[in-house]
Amino acid sequence: MLPRPITGRETSSPMPRLSPSLLPSPVAASARKPGSLALAALALVSLFVFPLARAFDRPETIFKIFQFPADKIPRIDGEASDWSLVPESYVTTHEQLTDDSSRKQKPDAKNLDVRVRVGWVKGLNRLYFLYEASDNYWDFSRPDLHNDTFEIIVDGDASGGPLIERQHPHKATLPAADTYFPFHGVHAQNYHIFTPFVGKDWCLAWGSQPWIKELPWANAAQNFNFKPGESGRYTLEFWITPFDYAGPEGPARAVESVLRENQLIGLGWAVIDYDDVNARGSSAFWNLSSQHTMYGNASELRAFRLMPLEPVFAPKLDARWSFKVLDDARRLVAFQDESIGQVTAWKWDFGDGETSTEQHPQHTYKKSDKFIVVLHVTGPDGTSRRAKIWDVALR
Ligand SMILES: [Ca+2]
Ligand SMILES: [Ca+2]
Ligand SMILES: [Ca+2]
């Protein structure tokens, strides 16, 4: 989606409610002097440089999502030892949450102590979570929403904007069902996860697509040994699949959010602490966002980055590549180097006797066949080879 000119943005209704002090400075300057062409041009440039900056709550802080190596993906069993490789810099605690209920309590580990880690695996459109909490009163005997809850909201393509029927832009005009079924949870998703879940589903996937909380789109396991009303430690391990489109008709037309390394996504959560089974409501709403309504508006989520592998897990040098047939009739193929590590020299063997030393060559094959293509890369850490057998096949 192309950024719109800045002059139209100051009054448009779906704008994230960021204070001017949080805007990148050239944008704020332009908003003060809308007549200045030079500043407006500068602001447009800044929109291309920071195209996502306005779609998040306090975007100056970017949280990190840990990349698990493919041979260290967590097992969803409620046992946390497979997360010990995640560095402390990826942990978010209750100290970063604000109680935005009417009580406005200060974080207190005796009342609620929370640690959250988020992970991903390159090539899988899944977000993994480890949720560890200690609570002075675990409230989970009732069959309804009155249950200690970890509420998460995910906007996998950082599109921002409202996601629940209550915030539908046309709710004054549309029949109620039309603000719910094609809209609620469709482009960004909200999960009320019950901590613990006993005698009920692990979560409410809040919207018209309850299928997203089941395999193969989600999985969860927990571990605890307290009874309702007791204090204790709780561990929850789960993964979800973010969707750009998750409609009420089921998964056949759904579009998963494709997760890419270094991409920013919108993510937020709140811990809804119920500390009295007989109380009417909760005792606190511990929010990672400064906006209470983040549960229904993806523009109020926090920015999270899908991190590359930590250096200790990254191979020093590994030849990798992909290809695309640009023109079937001319047998023209584009090759893309995707090697990991520092590379100073490339050598491609196209499998038809021809070679190239370009990084990203194109090659025209003279006859129909299936080829063995090999990339050799060289760098300060040595050499690496990657062959693909018969993947390159031409008519
Ligand atoms: Ca585990
Ligand atoms: Ca509590
Ligand atoms: Ca509680």
Image (tube, grey):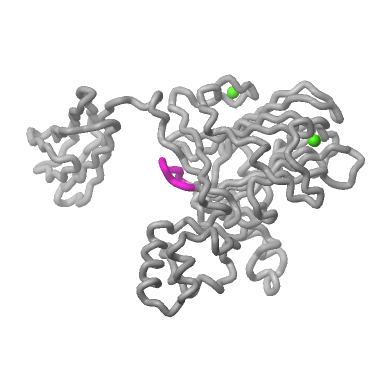
Q: Is residue 252 visible?
A: no
Position of 21 compared to 151: left or right? left
**Residue drawn where x is 8% and y is 36% of the image:** 354
Question: Which residue is most to the right?
Answer: 278
Q: Position of residue 4 (x, y in %)?
A: 44, 69
The quadrant the C terminus occupies is: top left
Q: Residue at x 70, y 73 (%)?
A: 172
User: What is the span of residues highlighted in magenta in the rendered image?
Assistant: 258-264
Decide: is 3 above or below 189: below
Above-or-below relation of 152 to 311: below
Asked if one can make out residue 302 in the rendered structure from this viewpoint, the answer is: yes
Quarter of the image where one finds residue 96: top right
Q: In the shown orientation, is residue 43 left or right of residue 386?
A: right
- Up/down of 234 relative to 276, above or below: above
Q: Nearer the viewer, residue 387 or 228?
A: 228
Q: Which residue is at 46% across, 68% downward?
A: 29
In reply to whether residue 95 is colored magenta, the answer given is: no
Q: Quadrant of ligand 2?
A: top right
Q: Residue at x 18, y 28 (%)?
A: 378
In the displayed structure image, the side of residue 273 where residue 186 appears, left or right: left
Q: Tell me residue 303's x, y (percent).
A: 53, 48
Quadrant containing the N terminus in the rendered view: bottom left
Q: Is residue 139 left or right of residue 245?
A: right
The image quarter in which residue 19 lies: bottom right
Q: Judge by depth and name the residue closer to the eye, 107 or 163.
A: 107
Is-magenta flag for residue 259?
Answer: yes
| Percent position of residue 119, x then y | 52, 34
